[in-house]
């Protein structure tokens, strides 16, 4: 007697799409995203209507030009520097500790908690990049410039309150920012040169 062919049982795949969708939602919800990796920049206020054109022009001594070329070489002022040297150069420029005439002009300002202080309020760090420079080098330069401000703020906070800037209350932080306001001006990247 010949045996009949048996049918192979089929796997029910009707719920496969549902399971895949649930797994997708699970991984989307449980994956941690780094949301604080951006660069915080505050735009300057618009010029006042009665402001004179002479006031808008910055004195050359008040501007530190930082330029990153297409080969990721860094120029600070009129000299080539490494990224490791940039923070110290920026700190010296921003603070102008010896009142150097080639660095930002200092003027007296009454700052809460500190009293009369000599500050370089009109300084600007101007950052320009070649369109061909790498994003990694650009971020490294940005980090060093922001770190220069952070270190200066920490130093004066430690001197006054024996705390880092981040540990101060809101009013104390505001006073420290009056002494060291963060002024980084970024020009839109342009193609200054071409790789051969």
Image (cartoon, rainbow, N blue to C red):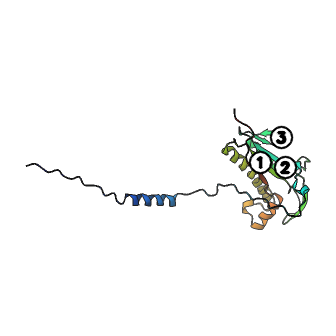
Question: How many C-alpha atoms fall within 10 Å of the one at disc 2: few (<14), some, or many (≥20)?
Answer: some
Find residue 168 and report its horizontal and vertical position in percent: 75, 64
Precedes in sequence: disc 2 or disc 1: 2
Query: Where residue 127 is drawn, which disc sits there?
Result: 1
Q: Quadrant of residue 122?
A: bottom right
Label 2 vs label 3: CA separation? 12 Å
Q: Residue at x 74, y 52 (%)?
A: 146
Q: Left or right of 108: which side holds 31?
A: left
Looking at the rendered structure, the secondary structure element under dot 2 is strand
Find residue 147 and report its horizontal and vertical position in percent: 74, 51
Q: Residue at x 60, y 56 (%)?
A: 34
Picture quarter with the C terminus: top right
Looking at this view, is 43 or 163 the one in front? Answer: 43
The residue that label 3 is drawn on is 78
Question: How many C-alpha atoms fall within 10 Å of the one at disc 3: few (<14), some, or many (≥20)?
Answer: few
Label 1 vs label 3: CA separation? 14 Å
Precedes in sequence: disc 1 or disc 3: 3
The residue that label 2 is drawn on is 63
Q: Residue at x 91, y 57 (%)?
A: 107
Looking at the rendered structure, the secondary structure element under dot 1 is strand
- The vertical placement of 109 against 132, above or below, is below
Label 2 vs label 1: CA separation? 10 Å
Looking at this view, is 99 or 4 the one in front? Answer: 4
Find residue 15 and report its horizontal and vertical position in percent: 36, 60
């Amino acid at each position: 007697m010949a045996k009949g062919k048996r049918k192979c049982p089929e796997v029910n795949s009707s719920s496969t799409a549902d399971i895949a969708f649930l797994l997708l939602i699970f991984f989307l919800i449980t994956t941690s995203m780094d949301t604080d990796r951006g660069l915080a920049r505050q735009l300057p206020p618009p010029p006042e209507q009665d402001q004179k054109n002479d006031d808008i022009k910055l004195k050359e001594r008040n501007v530190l030009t930082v330029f990153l070329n297409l080969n990721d070489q860094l120029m600070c002022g009129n000299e080539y520097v490494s990224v490791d040297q940039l923070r110290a150069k920026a700190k010296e420029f921003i603070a102008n500790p010896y009142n150097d005439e080639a660095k930002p002009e200092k003027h007296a300002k009454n700052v809460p908690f500190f009293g009369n202080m000599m500050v370089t309020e009109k300084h600007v760090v101007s950052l320009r990049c070649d369109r061909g420079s790498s994003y990694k080098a650009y971020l490294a330069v940005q980090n060093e410039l922001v770190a220069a401000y952070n270190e200066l703020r920490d130093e004066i906070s430690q001197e006054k309150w024996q705390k880092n800037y981040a540990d101060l209350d809101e009013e104390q932080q505001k006073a420290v920012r009056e002494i060291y306001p963060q002024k980084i001006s970024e020009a839109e990247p342009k193609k200054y040169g071409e790789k051969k």
